[in-house]
Image (spheres, rainbow, N blue to C red):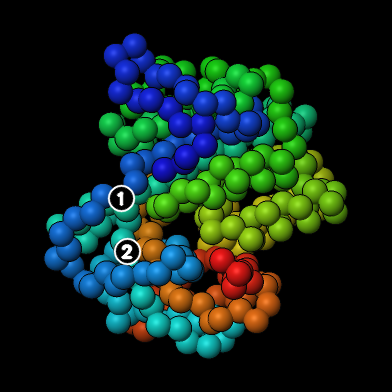
Amino acid sequence: MIRSGAVHLDSADGPRVRARWPLGACVIGLALPALAPAARQGPPVFGVAANVVRVAVVVTAPDGSLARDLRPADFELFEDGRRREIEMLRRADGWPGEAALGLDLLLLLDRSASMLKNLAGARTTAAALLSEIPKGDARGVVGLEGEPVFWREPPADPLAVLDAESKPVQAMVATGVDALRPAAGRKALVLLSDGDGLAGTRAWAETFRSISASDVTLYVISYAAHLGPKPRVASAQSRLEKLAAATGGVVLDGYFPGGREAVRRITEDLSAQYILGFQPAEPAKGGYRSLEVKVTRPGFRVRHRDRYLARVRDETR
């Protein structure tokens, strides 16, 4: 669960914020309960040391359906081209007899000038995604002055508490990544944007660096199609696709049909995730390392983040 700006959820007087969280006004948060220990009757789930690298994976079967029944023997994982032993395998909905794997998810709503004409539809789509989270799970919004408020049962308009001011897209992504960093379960960002705010070289570099150094899966609901001239549309869409692909996420059309298909795809994708864990090679130095996950069954396709940031171990501790 997200630790910063924790919220009491069981008060008889309604939700209460017990700590201020310095996040942007356009970040909307959902937090599902952290995983509780349970007896395991499915495939083995291996013990994992503290420095394990976790990789979220979604697998598509040859018929286009999401594969939900894979076992440890079905996966192969490579770090910088070298095979690593998979020491952990978890499934989003849990193995038989096991609790579901927790999810922390933040929605980022781009409200820059080019998005104003799409704002009403984007808000409707954001609210629809919030409503798809099962009842009883915590969800919420980061509201006035960056304070998060979570509910077990959200109010009729959970977006009403948003500030009027919007942060740049790169700042929102960085805020979301930082907020999800302490989360122990699955982590996802959903960005509703036309991508136009990433046109500058610095904005693009900052955003890509922030998201690619994280273990967050990014889903984008895109409104780039109506930006104007085709080169501008193509450029914005390409930027959004590169961001999502680096994390194992996808870009979905915010216009078709009214964002409903995007909501369905995201919720289905998240429900079919696996989490793989492995011990990295001892790092002689920090830096990015490539990741590749394969499924040994013929015709299966895998999505996952394509790299992770290795950090030098502090031997003085």
Q: Work out which quarter of the rendered image holds the C terminus and state it.
A: bottom right
Residue 297 x/y as whole percent: 34, 82
The crowding category of the residue bearing disc 2, from other C-alpha atoms within 10 Å (few below 14, some 14 to 19, many at least 20), is many
Q: Amino acid at mark 1?
A: Leu
For the question of whether residue 59 can be seen, the reply is: no
Using the image, tell me which numbered label, if any, was put on residue 90.
2
For the question of whether residue 102 can be seen, the reply is: yes
Specify whether 69 is left or right of 147. left
Q: Work out which quarter of the rendered image holds the N terminus and state it.
A: top left
Instruction: Verify CB contact (< 8 Å) between mark 2 and mark 1.
Output: yes
Outermost residue, front side: 316
First reached walking from the N terminus: tag 2 or tag 1 = 1
Element at label 1: loop
Which residue lies under the disc numbered 1? 35
Nearer to us in this view, 244 or 82: 82
Nearer to us in this view, 262 or 99: 99
The Cα–Cα distance between marks 2 and 1, rounded to whole angstroms, is 11 Å
Element at label 2: strand
Residue 296 x/y as whole percent: 36, 84
Q: Amino acid at mark 2?
A: Arg
Specify whether 110 is left or right of 70. right
Tell me the quarter of the picture where residue 169 sits. top right
Query: On screen, 150 above or below 107?
Result: above
Query: On screen, 301 above or below 34?
Result: below
Query: On screen, 156 above or below 189?
Result: above
- Which mark is nearer the camera, 2 or 1? 1
Outermost residue, right side: 201
Q: Residue at x 71, y 28 (%)?
A: 166
Q: Residue at x 71, y 23 (%)?
A: 165
Q: Residue at x 14, y 65 (%)?
A: 41
